[in-house]
Image: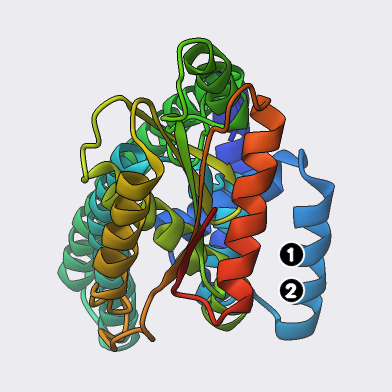
Amino acid sequence: MQDEGLNEANEILRKAVPLMQRLNIAPTPYNYGVCYEYSSNRTPKLNKLMDATIRTLGGVPDYLTKELFHQFVIDDSQFNNEHQNKIEALIEASQKNSKEMQGSLDSLDGVLKKSKRVLERADRQKHIEKVLNYLEKGTEKAIESTVKFNENLNVVRYEIDALKSDLEALKNNIELDPLTQHYNQKGLERYMYTWKKGAEDDLSLLLIDIDKLQSINKKHGRRAGTSLIRYVGKLIKDFNVDNSVLARIDGGTYALLINELELAKASELANSIRKKISLQKIRYKDTKKEMTQLTVSVGVATLIGDESVSSLLARARVYLENAKHRGRNRTSSN
């Protein structure tokens, strides 16, 4: 959702809510977010997918709106844990209001049906007056709930806009990885060049790569892989290594650069990190079923003489590939 003015937002809202009612789409935050974006006509690809689904199925299933929400409304894979918690709290609060509104609409439906039955056998003026009073109260209650729900939807919209602004700010920091808030390769290289000046064969680099991440993404979805990337970064960070910098340089690969640490100690640290990760018991959020063992492979390289930064990084990659070829869940060093 983009930052519209209040009038424009209300105009889109007037299109989105009837669309949901016409297609019998439940007023959940995911459904609302997708229908709001669809009604804004800003995302042609989303509208094309929605139109095709509506033609084929006559509506949009909840499981699909959830995927469309993550793909087109807000890509939460780019947020850190704090943002993730905010999104979950926002959805939970909105879900509660959605259920309350649905309950009021169901109650109104009951009022209408009962009123119709009474009218069919009403034979006196006072019967009709009672029905009108009953109908008026039921309608007022539904209107109050609808107004409250619409107010809540506006809160959701502004909260999402704020979170997206945070994401944009993270992206604009050229040395930070927006997914994890650790350094990216540019930030890593800055430290490598700075520390290299005073290094004496004691600047060590660990390349730590999640094994079979592509298979995990294929089997369980990209969001599962994204969660694992964040989780592994936290595990590495929890070692609290002195004089170190942690960076995610691509995919599921982390680089841990340590100043004033010789090769032997660096290899010991690499094995400690590898073992700790392999001992983790991870369960799927939905099924609570335990995931296949999570492992990493590690390449360890320590600066040799006046070796260049690019050479040190290249050697660490060679050792990482060696660890992979030897069967994964291994450490390889010079």
Q: Is 103 located above or below residue 262 in the figure?
A: below
Which residue is label 2 attached to? 54
Q: Identify the residue at image location x=41%, y=62%.
A: 228
Kindly report the distance in space between the C-alpha atoms of the residues bearing marks 2 and 1.
6 Å
Can residue 286 be seen from the camera position used here?
A: yes
Q: Residue at x 25, y 55 (%)?
A: 92
Q: Position of residue 246 (x, y in %)?
A: 41, 35
Mark 1 lies on residue: 50
Report the amino acid beneath label 1: Met
Looking at the rendered structure, the secondary structure element under dot 1 is: helix
Please state the horizontal and vertical placement of residue 89, each as a whole percent of the image.
25, 47
Tell me where residue 118 sits by quadrant: bottom left
**48 and 256: which one is in front?**
256
Camera sees residue 217: no
Location of residue 123 (image quadrant) = bottom left
- Which of the pair 235/307 is nearer the observer? 307
Circle 1: is it few (<14), some (14-19), or many (20+) Cα within 10 Å? many
When the figure is inspected, residue 163 is found, relative to residue 270, above or below; the finding is above
Left or right, 304 with respect to 291, comes to right
Labels 2, 1: front one:
1
Classify the position of the N terminus by image quarter: top right
